[in-house]
Amino acid sequence: MAIEINVGPPRLAINQGYGVLITDQDGQIPWPTDKGFYHSDTRVISSWQIFADGESWKLLNSGNVAYYANRIFLTNPILHTEIGVVPEHTLGLSISRSIGGGIHEDLDLVNHGMDKVQFNLEIAVRSDFADIFEVKSGSIVRRGRITSAWSQGAPRLTIAYVNKDFKRRVTVTAHKWDSKPVYANGRISFELELKPGEAWHSCLLYAVGDGETIDHAPDHCIAQTGGAGAHRKLSQWRDATLKIETSNEEFYRFYHQSLEDMAALRLPIEGTDHLEFVPAAGVPWFLALFGRDSLTVSLQNAMVHSSFARGALEVLSRHQATRRDDYRDAEPGKIMHELRRGELAHFKLIPHTPYYGTADATILYLIVLHNAWRCTGDPDLLARFLPVAEKCLSWIDEYGDRDGDGFQEYQTRSKAGAYNQGWKDSGQALVNTDGSIVTAPIALVEIQGYVYDAWLRMAQVYDALGKSARAQTLREKAEALFVRFNDTFWDEESGFYAFCLDGEKKQVLSVASNPGQCLWSGIVPPDRAAKVVKRLMEPDMWSGWGIRTLSTDNPSYNPNSYQNGAVWPHDNGIIAMGFRRYGFANEAACIARDISGAAGYFVQHQMPELYSGMQRDPTDFPVQYLGANVPQAWAAGSCFAMLQMIVGFQPDAPAGKLYIDPVLPEWLPKLTIRDLRVGENVFDLRFWRDDDATRFETLKGDPLAVVQKSYATATTRWL
């Protein structure tokens, strides 16, 4: 039997909505650290420790029981008390927590010894109310005043922060206690006296307020209800989404953990239920609304939950820019990048109110709108969001193409703006062949493909709306871009596309993963696709755990860097879909196996945002990037992208059709999918390998609505 290796950071993390709790494995938050209880981009608990007469407890074990709840089991060291010595391991202390707005914390203690014990259980709580940006950077500035007050009647500890009109507070209320606490020396203290075999319980409820509203803690103890409301919502989410059965346990577990991760990252939309939502980007640093991430995840989830995109389309439309604002990199029609709710954003010390420094979200909005329409067949989607799309199309022409050369370029105008504004958005992500930073303005290769794809998709939308002249104009623009792009970005000598064009419109010929996304967009001529696929599968790019972001031959390559050599699962998912689009099913399946295999090594099969680009060999395993977000929405969604690729998913709900082109790889010889929704139709489909061919049958739904159609349609997909 093979040894099971679990890779992941030594921490506990639970989250729901805009709240996330990150602790050590013993449930404590040491000081100083970047852990804590964060709510709406503010750390409201910065230190939490528990003692028995001043002595620290010992960890037995801990773990999450759901994305919103965990349990920690502790025992005592030797305690010297006024009535005698308490031998070590005599007491059992369990801490159970659930998050849902605030935090419900259950403290349960049992005396397993033969003698009575008497001691003080003490909980030390501190709050620094630091902005999440400053915690992450390690440079925290205190701008306001922190006060604390204890109400013995409740009993309740209130810690408040005020900086002018920015207010935050957290209250810690003892509830259902078996002995009433007191507060002294910064600690909530319970005086305990337990006979042999006797148990003790208390709840602590952590509520968070901003001066106007209060997010209360869940009402129920975890041991009694399992998290009641959150558990019910998770069950409803599972019922509403695609189910799979497969002979590959590894992929099965990856898929189901990805479903749970997607549920964990749901941000509520005011006025809707929990099945209409927008996903946060990731935990802990990106529990906020992001344009690019939400749209990418919507595309990934098209097969899993056909209405998934509604939330992103709705919320992002509310924040579409109406005027130019250089500090926020905003321009009329532009879709936002990132919205924050902490102190720095409140006082506009950062431009995230929201910030618009993204070169691709506006284009992706059009792609998602078309895809959502194809999945749902809902004409109201087009009626509701076509005005938004029109503004996006105008932005592409007027602002995306900064110099009128027909390509999309970006360069920040903000003193606090992002230098790089594609998905590789770190300041060091775009490098020349000598390792130096590419000069702006920058025309990224994959963004040209996005525009090509968006124009063709919107042409199809306009045809459906009876606006054939508008559709023809967009097709002509797409055709012109196709020619111009392939003349300008292709390097015949290397047989590969330039990473980007720099500020002088020179090709940057660093070998990176970005051109792989052009296969997904369809902007690559079929006769060049084989060269792109072959180049990406060379050893300097393919690690065995997926395709790296940057070639090992580049001087800036570092397998443990953020975007200069690491492997990003979502990037690989898009590339794999592109491989299949051009008929390279075996290579696409290889990438899918890499990513699925890597997931099997991470704790709970929970895919991190990225992991090391080190070369795979028989003795190693994937190494998680320090600081990677887990869970992370488009990392989890990479599983769903791979599933779309394997099935050859091509929805056409407006026509009442589901087109598929399944190619099951050897490692996935059987697959059944259930509750696949395409418009009004719901299908169950079974797939199996028959020698080298893949067969399928319709188990539920109209079999005449399911049609096999080649997924390898290359540049004619939307023409």
Image (cartoon, rainbow, N blue to C red):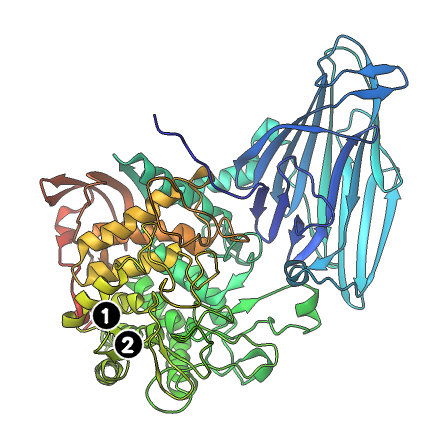
Quadrant the C terminus occupies? bottom left
On the image, which quarter does residue 409 sit in? bottom left
Give the x, y percent position of residue 173. 77, 39
Q: Is 180 on the left-hand or right-hand side of 626?
A: right
Query: Contact (CB < 8 A) between labels 1 and 2?
Result: yes
Say which mark, if any, is on residue 693: none
On the image, which quarter does residue 456 sit in? bottom left
Farthest bottom residue?
A: 404
The secondary structure type at the circle numbered 1 is: loop
At horizontal 74% and vertical 14% (from top left) the residue drawn is: 198
The 10 Å Cα crowd at callout 1, few under 14, some 14 to 19, many 20 or more, is many
Q: Is residue 166 at all visible to an observer of this figure? A: yes
Please determine whether, in this image, residue 88 is positioned above or below residue 314.
Answer: above
Q: Is 279 on the left-hand or right-hand side of 115?
A: left
What residue did someone put label 2 on?
A: 452
At horizontal 89% and vertical 40% (from top left) the residue drawn is: 185
Farthest top residue?
A: 114
Kind of residue indicated by mark 2: Tyr
Give the x, y percent position of residue 398. 41, 88
Q: Is residue 680 at all visible to an observer of this figure? A: no
Q: Which residue is more in the foreground, 669 or 308?
A: 669
Q: Which residue is more in the foreground, 478 or 373?
A: 478
At horizontal 78% and vertical 24% (from top left) the residue drawn is: 178
What residue did someone put label 1 on?
A: 522
User: Which sits earlier in the primary sequence, circle 1 or circle 2?
Assistant: 2
The 10 Å Cα crowd at callout 2, few under 14, some 14 to 19, many 20 or more, is many
Kindly report the distance in space between the C-alpha atoms of the residues bearing marks 1 and 2: 8 Å
Kind of residue indicated by mark 1: Gly
